[in-house]
Amino acid sequence: MTKPLGRFQGATSERVVDDLVEKKTHIIKTQDVEGIIQANHELSGLLKSTKGNSQSSMKRVGTIPVIVGLKWAQESGLTMYSRPWYDYCRKKLKDPENRGFRVEAP
C-alpha cells in the first residue's frame, strides 16, 4: 500500500512480514525521503540569500519526514506534536546524521 503525502513528503509504504521462526508478525513502514532532503537543500540556499529580511521571530529549521517523526516518537516515548516531542526533535536535528532534514543549522 502506497500513500502520497504531499509535494515533498514522498510516498510511504507498509508491508506485513510473518516471522515463522519467532511466530511474530512485523509491520515494516518505509518512506522515500529524497524529495524532502532535496527541498530542504534548495530552501536552505533561498534562506541564505534572504537572511536578515525576515520580520518574523519564527524560522523554519527543517522538514522531518513522517516516518522519521514516528520513529523519534517511538524512541522517546513522547506523543507526536507535543511540546516535549518538538524539543526532542530539535535535539535530533542537531545530530550530523540528520543534517539532510535541516534547512539551516538549528
Image (spheres, rainbow, N blue to C red):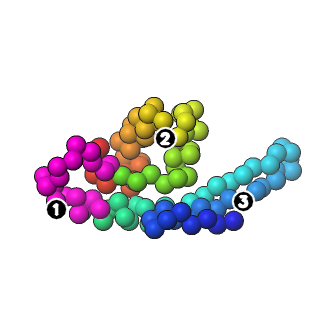
Q: Which residue is drawn at 56% across and 60% down?
A: 31
Q: How far apart are labels 2 and 1 at the CA level?
A: 30 Å
Q: How far apart are labels 3 and 2 at the CA level?
A: 25 Å
Q: What residue type is labelled 1?
A: Ser
Instruction: Look at mark 1 in the image and give the residue it sits on.
Output: 49
Which tag, 2 or 1, sits closer to the chain's start? Answer: 1
Q: Nearer the viewer, residue 75 or 12?
A: 12
Q: Seen in the image, is 41 located left or right of residue 74?
A: left
46 versus 72 height, above or below: below
Q: Which of 10 and 99 is in front in this view?
A: 10
Q: Which amino acid does label 3 sit on?
A: Arg
Helix, strand or loop at mark 3: strand
Of badges 3 and 2, nearer the viewer stands 2
Q: Please tell me in which quadrant of the rendered image residue 87 appears.
A: top left
Q: Residue 81 carries which label?
A: 2
Q: Can residue 34 be seen in this view?
A: no
Helix, strand or loop at mark 2: loop
Residue found farthest to the left: 52
Q: Residue at x 23, y 63 (%)?
A: 46
Instruction: Look at mark 3 in the image and give the residue it sits on.
Output: 15
Q: Residue at x 16, y 59 (%)?
A: 50
37 versus 68 height, above or below: below
Q: Main structural element of the magenta stretch: helix, strand or loop?
A: loop
Q: Does the magenta stretch include residue 58?
A: yes
Q: Seen in the image, is 51 located left or right of residue 92?
A: left
* Magenta region, residue range: 43-61
